[in-house]
Structures are given as C-alpha cells and as structure tokens.
Image (cartoon, rainbow, N blue to C red):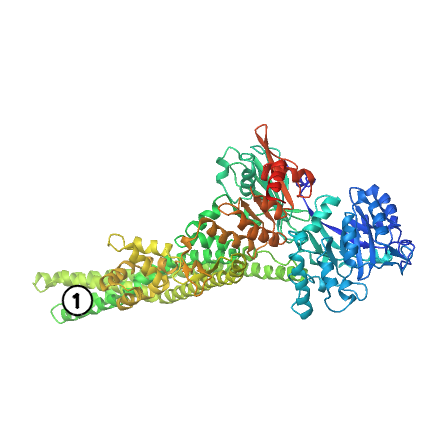
Amino acid sequence: MIALKDIRPVDNGAKFLNVDLHIHTYGGSADVKDPALTPEAIVDSAVKQNLSVIAITDHNSNISVEAAMAHAQQYADKLMVLPGVEVTTAHGHLLVYFAPENYKELGKFLVKIELIGEMGAENSRTAKSMADVIAEAEKHGAICVAAHIDREKTGFEKFAPGFQDWKRDIICSSGLYGLEHDDISTIDWYSNQDDSSPAGSERKKIYSARAATVKLEGRHHLAHLQGSDSHSLAQFESSDPNKVWTKIKLTELSWSAFRTALIDPTARVRPTQSVPRLTPRILGMGIAGGFLNGEKLHFSDNLNCLIGGRGTGKSTAIRALAYGLGMIDDFAEVENCPDVTYIFCEDANGIRFMYTRTRGNPPSVQAKEGDARTEVPRDSFRIEYFGQGMLAEVAKDPLNSPDLLQDFLDRHITLKDLEATETTLMSQLRENAARLAPLEENASQLGPRRQQIADITKKLKIAEEGNLKEIVEAQTKIAAEKSVVQNLEQISLMYASGVTLADYQRDFDQLIETAGELTGEAESEKELGNLRAVIEDSNELLTTKATELTEELKVKAAEIDRHLSALKQSHAKLDEEIATKIADLKTRGLAGDMTEIAQLIKDRAALTVEVTKTDQKKTTLQAIRRERTEFLNELVSARQKMTSRRKAQLLEVNKNLSQSIKDYKVFVKYDDAGIVDEFQGFLQSKMAGSYFQEVTCKAVCESLTPQELVDLVFAKDVKGIEEKCELKEEWAKQLIERLTPWNVLYELQILSKQPKPLIIVRTTSSPPREIPVKQLSDGQRHTILLTIAMLAESNIPLVIDQPEDDLDNAFIFESIVSTLRAVKERRQIILVTHNANIAVLGDSELILPMKRENDVGKVVDRGSIDKEATKNMVQQILEGSPAAFIRRQKIYGH
C-alpha cells in the first residue's frame, strides 16, 4: 500500500516561495535606529517566518552582507541570502542583487559607481544616473530592480513629473529585471495592463520601447515586486496577513533559479496579495505492478509535463491516472496497466480524497475531513481528461456529431444537479404514464359506451311494449341492481386491501444527499436537526393513521360483504320468479326472441359497470393528469436551465476564441433545430414499414419539438402537421395514426431536443464570408477545441495526452504556450508532450522526464527547467541532445 506520506517527499518541481528582497540592517544603514535589527536576527527571523529568499540591501553599503550570509549557512536548505545594496542614484533608489557565490563583486561594484559620502550614511549617493548604475551592475553579473517606484522623492516614477528620456533609458536597460511597488494598486505600471490614463498611456509607450529593444528580445517583461523595506525588527516581523512580500516560483534555492524566475516574471513572480487561492488538485499518484511498478508522482499544483521517448511510459502514466480516478475502464485490458493505483486529491475546500483501484475492479474512494474517513462516490473529485486522439475525434466533424461537441462543452460547466433532476422526473413520468394510460383509454371510451347503453335501452323499451313487458322491465331493473353489486364488490375489495400513505412520506436523508454539500454552519445544523425530527414525526403519524384506517376499512368491507350476500340472495329469488314466468310464456308460445333480449340486458349491465368504474375514477384521472402536467413543467424547466447554462458559457468561450485565433473569426452558437438523434430514432421506429424517408423524418424533427408534435397528434390536427412539417396529407395522417396510442404519446412527450451547438467560422475579410468548419484543417479544428478546453471557466484539473497533435510549432508558441501560462495558476494541468515549447516556454513547474530501464518505465531527474539535471534531460529528450541544441543555435546565428 502506498500512502500520501510516501509521495510527499518526492520532488514536485517549482513552487511559489516567500521572498523579501528589501531589508536594511542596524549598522549598515544610518537611518535604521533599532539595534535589534542585526544580520543574524534577520536571518533567524526569516526562517521562522517561512521566508525562502532574503536580500540585505543597506543604503550604499555592503557592511552587513557577509555576516548575514555566514549566519545563514546553518539554514542552507531553507534560506538563501542574496548580497545586495540599495543605491541612491541621480534618479532615485535602485536595488542591486548579486549571486551569493560572487558576493565580492558587490564591493567592486560600489567602487565603480563612485559613491559620495560615507557608505551607509543618510547623505551617501552616487552622481551617476540610474541607467548608468544599472549598466555597471550588469557588467558585474548583477540583477537590478528599481526601488519603490511609486514613492515620492525616492522612486524614479515619482522622482520628477513627466516622461523624460532618462525614464525611457531606465526601463529599456537590459540590466533592469523588475520594479518594486509600495502600493499594490500601482502593480501594473509599465506593463501591458497599465491603466488608460494619460500617464498610463505614456508608461505603455515606454514599455513598448523596452519590448522593441533587441537585447531584451524574449525577456522584455518586468517583474513587479513588493518588499518590506524593513528598518526595524518589528516592521520585519509584522503580523499583517497582507505582508508586502513577493512570491517567486523556484525549484531550488540557487542564483540560477532566481535569475530564471526574473527572466520569466509573468509566470514566476507574484506580489503576495495576488497569489490565487487554493484550487482542486491531484496531489500525487503511486503505482504498484505493471510497467510503472513502484513509481511515485508528486504533482505540482500548476503545469506538469511528462516527457520521454517512445515506450517510456508517458501515456501509460496518464492513462493510469484516468483509470485510477474512474474516468476510463478499458485500460485494465492493457498489459501495462498497474495492479493497484493509488491517487490522492484535494478539493477547493481542503477535503482530501484517496482513490484506490485494483486492476479489473471499480475504484474505491474515501474522503478525509479532519480525522473522519467516509466512503464516497467515484465522481466526488472531478477532472477533465482527454486521452490521445479524443479531441481529434470531437474535432473530426462537429456539424454531424453535435452530441460529441455538446458532451465536450458540458465538461466545462456544472449540469450534474439538473441531470439528476431530469433523470428523476423522467422516471416519475414513465411511472405516471403506466398509471395514466389505462385510465385515459377508458375515459376515451366513455362517450361510445354511453351511446351503446342508450341504444340498448331503446331496444329494450320497444321489447317492453310487447308480451314480455313485465318480464323485460323486471330483468332490466335486476340487471341494473346487479351492476351496483359489482361496483360495491370492487369497493369492498379496495377497502379490504388496506390504505397506504407512503406517497406523503419523505426520506430526509435522501433530501440532504440529493442537495449536495451543505454549509455545516452550527445554526443551520441545529435547524436541519429540528426539521429532520418534524419529518420523521410526520412519517410516523402517516404510518399510524394508515394502519388505523386499514383496520377500520377492513371492518367496513366485511359489513359490505354481509349486506351484498343478502342482496344476492334476493336477486336469486327474483331470477327464479322471472325464469318461471318465462317458462310459462314459452309453453303458451308467447316468449318471442327472449335470447336476444337477455343478451341486450347483459350487455347493458356490463357497459353500465364499466361506465360507473370510469366515472368513479374521474377524480383519480384528474389528479394523475395534474401530476403529469406538474412533472412535465418541471422537466421543461430543468431542460431550459440546462440550455441557459450552456448559452451563458458561450460568452467566455467566444471571448477566448476571439483572443486566441486570429486567422478567422470563430465562435460557437446554439441552433434551435436541435440535436435530434433520439427524437429521429424514436419517430423512425414508429414509422417502420411505411417507407417514411430518413431525410423527411429528420426534417420533421428539426421543425418542431416532441411536445409540439404530441399536441398536434392529440388534437388530430392533420393540417397543422402538414404546415409545420411541410408534409403531404397522407403522411400527416399516418403520423397521427402511428403515434396515437397513449403509451407512444407519453414516451414521445418526454423526449429531449436540446439546441444544437455549432462552430461558426468566418473570414476576417470585408464583407466576412462563412466557411464550413469541415473545410478547416485537422489542426485548425483541434485548435478551436483545445482553446475552449484550456480557457474554460473551470478550476478542475485538466489532463491531456499530447495536446500538440495536429498543431504546428508556430501556433503552439503563439497561442498554446501563452494560454497555458495564463490558466495554470487557476487550474492544475497535467500533460504528456513531445514539444519543447510547451514544457519550456510554458514554464512547466514540474517536468517529469521518463526513461525505459530494465523493461520498466522510470521518472528521472524531475524538476523545473531551472534545475540543471532537469534542463539536461529536456535537451536530451526534446531537443535531441545538448550538443544538437547548441549546434542548431549556432546555425540560426544566436
């Protein structure tokens, strides 16, 4: 058995770590008056506060750097101290950082910038411009960050009004890696997201100039940071939860990793206040048996890329993950399938789930909240999974496979509650139909039966006028009375069978379970407990009353039977008397056609019983009709809500498509012609043998809803069907004839016909021209779906096997990479890829290189690209080898 504690120690790549890159010391900066703020105290406190990187940045001084670095040696695995300085330049303050191993360069640098005044003194400074100081720092291998740019007098942005050339020189300096901000509201200055004010527009112009600087090609983005600028120990140890620190994503505590993060700040640098909240994530997976026997994968919360040559186990790992979570079942038949898969997940509320799946069996799922463990359904933790070729299958022909496209779109919204409601209502409607159909059939015969009774009565009246008047009159009355007896016998049987009030009883536990997760608030729990007691008391009351009524009605049934027995004896005597009279008439030859009269009396009695039964069930019929109407209204409402959620989703989907795909205008819409596969299949089955053409049947289904067709059939509206469906009269009549049976109508009534999703493609020319989506290349169609999948308004983990299939490298770089970088902080992504752009430029927090050793797959040198061993494996697998990469670089002339 593999537990989470076995997976936790495994490297899971780069993580956001707390850093404070602006700290002063007592003795290093003259404006620090707190003697407790020593280098040693700062280091000890940093470790306690869970800081991973700090920088000692005294004013124009390096006096405290060595002491801090020496004291930090004991915390080498927890803390990295950067030697730094805050230089007072001619244009404001500048933070300069050096590699710990090259800390002596800091002293040389301070000499080169020709400081005026005593080091660390409040009036110490350099006469050089900030741009010149940055250039000098770059020569010494340092990294520069403009300090508190939004602070009056000492921040370069507030240092002087306007946008002079010296500001442009600072921003366009290749040695400038970032900007420090005091106020979180200014964090977008000098970026593409800067505000639209006149000042913001000017800053954007300068930032655009930086982007166009040749030396900054590929790394023009600036890191936007916050630091404590601590001048006292109390300030450094502030308990404010919104501390002005920065989060930097690192795979190891090294200068190389730090520099890599600042080169790629849009993915790796965040002010603490802007780090996203917890999202659902797969924590890790352990495998026992199969091709990956013994492997443990500890996933990053962000982007994970499995790379490797053919047959190394990349796709096996992804499929094992999907199999373990119950997303696929056929993997058990594959030789590489693990014997047991252990998967550990955590939802957005911090509830942990453990999935254990033994090969060939369904997954066992346990939820852990606090110390409590409970068995839960397999879909308690959701992911979005696309195996190799799955997206391509949806993309193949979305116009003729709208159900596949709809299933794909539905992955990104929550419909589970409405689908459960729909399933329940359809079950209730089918049960309702089973009760209602015979009642409706009888009710439809009520008119004809009454007419038959009237006709028989007329015949008997004629018979009464002859020799048999007395006998016919007596027989008619006895027959009427016997029909009363038959109906009373049915009532007696009903009373004797007892009463149930189960329809009024409710299962409180089921109500709670169906509703989903509740708040758990104490006041809510109290009131829910009270409500449970009321429902349980009511159920008990209903059971008691039903038992009482049953006993009392059984007594009444016995009384009815006793009286009916006496009445039957009376009827027997009357029958005997009539028989004697008929025999006497026969001997005298006056009986006539007595057999026919007897049959008429018998028929009328039988019809009277049926009419009486039907009349007595009118109340029941009306109640079941009302029930069906309510169920149908609820079903329509649930389906309308589904449609509303689906259409609401398109706002974000279409915005994302417009931003990601530039060659065409692509959008998704819903067509009311609808997805008619189920409707069409049903109709064709009922019209079997009639030569009703498939194309005609499809046209009928697209022209109206199942409910509209039911209404037309019920009304026998031949003309209406002709007009709405554009059918000839003979086909309209056949439709009515074939669909008239109640059981057919009721099944038709609950069929679904949801609007059909369509992908619309138009040229960007004027006027735009619509292009059939089938005419797009496989790659273009794949791109549309991949964009929807990755940018969906969903935070559940996204797992894809080789998303680059059918896509060219240029598009992967221009669109997929930027999309991955945009979404990986709000949803976990796990990919198998052969593409270096995805793993490297997508800034995968965890790269999992895989090799085949001794006929099993192994993960080797896992980590982020800023880890040397991982970088070498990436070059080996995705670039051919480090030598091949360098050779191509030389051929390209870079």
Tell how many labels: 1
345 sits left or right of 782 in the view: right
- Give the answer, above or below, for where 857 lies relative to 778: above
Q: Position of residue 212 (x, y in %)?
A: 64, 57
| Quadrant of the drawing holding the N terminus | top right
Which residue is located at x 72 percent, y 59 percent? 171
**Quarter of the image where one finds residue 652:** bottom right
Dot 1, crowdedness within 10 Å: few (<14), some or many (≥20)?
some
Residue 516 visible in the current orientation? yes
* Residue 618 location (% of width, % of height): 35, 67
User: Is residue 874 visible to the viewer in this orientation of the structure?
Assistant: no
* Mark 1 residue element: helix
Q: In this view, does 157 lie above or below 53?
A: below
Task: Specify the quadrant that holds the C terminus.
Answer: top right
The residue under the point 89% across, 50% down is: 63
Q: Quick check: 559 left or right of 235?
A: left
Name the one closer to the observer, 514 or 616.
Answer: 514
Expressed as whole percent of the image width and height from the top left, the position of residue 549 reads 46, 61
Is residue 603 found left or right of 45 in the rendered image? left
Identify residue for label 1.
471
> Horizontal placement of 844 versus 577: left or right?
right
